[in-house]
Image (spheres, grey):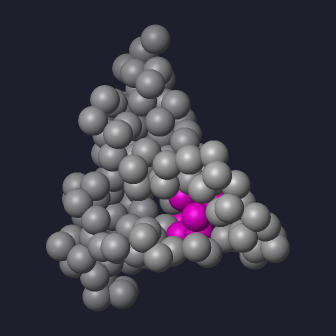
């Protein structure tokens, strides 16, 4: 496997639980395969990573909002860990980096210290694209 195919990047622009869980699950799979994994948070994806937001966020995508209550109940019954816990565990065992979009941070007057500690840096789109070049990039 070449160095470029060892990169897996996700652009997360949604802050709903279903989309964040999907992104974290994909990041976990990529990290388990030994891929250098990046999650780039922009717009509402970034908002989902503000300090303590994950503890009260029960928003689901508009298409699936009718299933929110049922899904959350099933997750509790089956003891599915929340996405933040899964992400923290994955970051301990794999090469996963979470980056916040500088433009979105400026737009909403958010500072890095306002974010969960899993977010390691603020970067621009060009830097993210450059770092991700040659690997797989998904948009969620």
In the image, is 91 to the left or to the right of 57?
Answer: left
Q: Is residue 16 shown above or below 84?
A: below
| Residue 132 horizontal side relative to residue 61, left or right | left
User: Is residue 50 rendered to the left or right of residue 13?
Assistant: left
Q: Return the x and y of residue 80 as percentages of the image width and height.
A: 56, 47
**Which residue occupies 43% across, 68% down?**
54
Q: In this view, does 63 lie to the left or right of 83?
A: right
At x 42%, y 62%, the residue is: 41
Where does residue 24 sit, x and y in percent of width and height? Answer: 50, 47
Which residue is at the front of the view, 83 or 63?
83
Instruction: Indicate the quadrant containing the C terminus: top left, top right, bottom left or bottom right.
Output: bottom right
Q: Is residue 106 above or below residue 126?
A: below
How many labels sit on residues?
0
**Residue at figure coordinates x 49%, y 68% from the top left:** 45
Instruction: Tell me the quarter of the picture where residue 14 sits.
Output: bottom right
Does 48 sit above or below residue 107? above
Q: Determine whether 42 is above or below 79 in the image.
A: below
Tell me if I can see residue 94 in this picture.
yes
Is residue 69 on the magenta stretch? no
User: Residue 16's x, y, as percent?
Assistant: 59, 69
* Part of the protein shown in magenta: 13-20
The furthest residue to the front: 77
For the view shown, which residue lies furthest in the top direction? 1
Residue found at the far left of this picture: 113
């Amino acid at each position: 496997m070449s160095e470029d195919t060892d990169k897996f990047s996700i652009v997360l622009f949604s802050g709903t639980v279903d989309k964040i869980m999907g992104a974290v699950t994909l990041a976990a799979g990529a990290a388990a395969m030994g891929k250098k994994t990046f999650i780039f948070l922009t717009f509402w994806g970034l908002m989902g990573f503000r300090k303590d937001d994950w503890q009260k966020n029960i928003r689901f995508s508009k298409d699936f909002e009718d299933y929110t209550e049922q899904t959350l109940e099933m997750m509790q019954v089956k003891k599915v860990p929340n996405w933040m816990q899964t992400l923290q565990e994955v970051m301990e065992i794999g090469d996963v980096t979470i980056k916040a979009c500088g433009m979105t941070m400026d737009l909403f007057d958010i500072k890095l210290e306002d974010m969960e500690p899993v977010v390691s840096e603020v970067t621009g789109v060009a830097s993210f694209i450059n770092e991700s070049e040659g690997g797989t990039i998904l948009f969620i």
